[in-house]
DNA sequence: ACATCATTTAGATATTTAGCTAAATGTAGT
DNA sequence: ACTACATTTAGCTAAATATCTAAATGATGT
């Protein structure tokens, strides 16, 4: 759980997770959303993997990252409960607040 | 919101918040719960203050820290909603003596 | 075999962070 | 005014972090 919070402490990584919520993406696609180099992004992906927040699948020469929602959810819920807060999936199918529909390129 | 997540990325600070949920405490009382020096704790308090997660009130020669639940709640909720998660106050739970409404400084 | 593409690893650097001890500040009591 | 107490500030160090460029790895297509 500490690793999850460390991972969440960086805005780039939080945004990566947010992008992955819409759908899995390759490392390159994700990188295109940020103004930093690919090796830097690769390091961010490694932190997210170490926190078990994402999983990677190699397909040909691309690597597709997928968010592990249950891990994020459990960490958030576990923490929230320490403060008498409850967390539950928002009735799904409905996009979350602030969700935009992203276009693939 | 970034400052809140940075603040939450350290286990000592998360535990400070958890302790403060039960009731406000002085800097010294809080420090007694951790195996680090008081100056180090003081630095942690400063980070929590900067994130607006706690407020400090001087009374005589002690300084009492109080959690700002609404700030924590808003940050958690705001983030959770990006992922289609909803967060709401748990029905009852431990009431928490000082668990009340705070306003900005 | 070779060139190309996607991604990661290596190696370097600058900044931030968590920790310490010692000193300064502010308040209370005598 | 002096002493004691509670807390923060100053100054330091070691470790972690975010970033970069250049090089290595691995897969595809010619």
Image (cartoon, coloured by chain):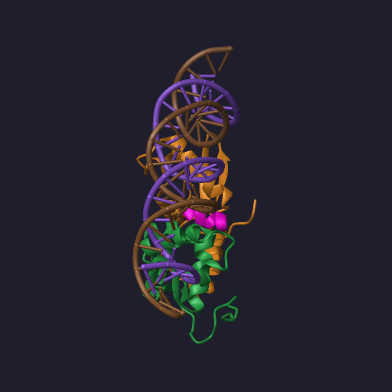
Chain colours: A green, B orange, C purple, D brown
Q: Is residue A18 visible?
A: no
Point 54% across, 43% down: residue: B46
In this picture, is A91 found above or below B38?
Answer: below
Q: List the single residue furthest toward the right.
A: B105
| Of residues B17 and D25, the one drawn nearer to the viewer in this rendering | D25
Give x and y (percent) for residue D15: 38, 42
Give x and y (percent) for residue B4: 53, 56
In this picture, is C28 found above or below B79?
Answer: above
| Of residues B1 and A20, the one drawn nearer to the viewer in this rendering | A20
Q: Quadrant of the N terminus of chain B?
A: bottom right
Point 45% across, 56% down: residue: B21
| B3 drawn magenta | yes
Give x and y (percent) for residue A38: 50, 61
Left or right placement of residue A16 versus residue D15 in this view: right
Point 49% across, 39% down: residue: B42
Point 57% across, 68% down: residue: A33
Give x and y (percent) for residue A67: 43, 73
In this picture, is D2 found above or below A76?
Answer: above
| Of residues A100 and B16, the one drawn nearer to the viewer in this rendering | A100
| A86 drawn magenta | no
| Of residues D1 and A37, the one drawn nearer to the viewer in this rendering | A37
User: Over which residues does the magenta segment extend?
Assistant: B2-8
| Label tally | 0
Instruction: Decide whether the magenta segment is chiefly helix, strand or loop.
Output: helix
Q: Is residue A34 visible?
A: yes
Q: List the single residue furthest toward the bottom.
A: A93
């Amino acid at each position: 759980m500490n690793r999850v919070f460390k991972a969440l402490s960086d805005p780039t990584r939080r945004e990566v997770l947010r992008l992955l919520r819409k759908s899995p993406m390759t490392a390159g696609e994700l990188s295109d959303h940020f103004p930093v180099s690919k090796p830097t992004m690769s390091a961010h992906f490694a932190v997210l993997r170490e926190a078990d927040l994402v999983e990677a699948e190699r397909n040909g020469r691309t690597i597709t990252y997928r968010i592990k929602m249950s891990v994020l959810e459990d960490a958030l819920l576990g923490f929230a409960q320490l403060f008498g807060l409850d967390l539950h999936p928002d009735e799904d199918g409905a996009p979350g607040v602030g969700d935009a529909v992203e276009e693939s390129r």
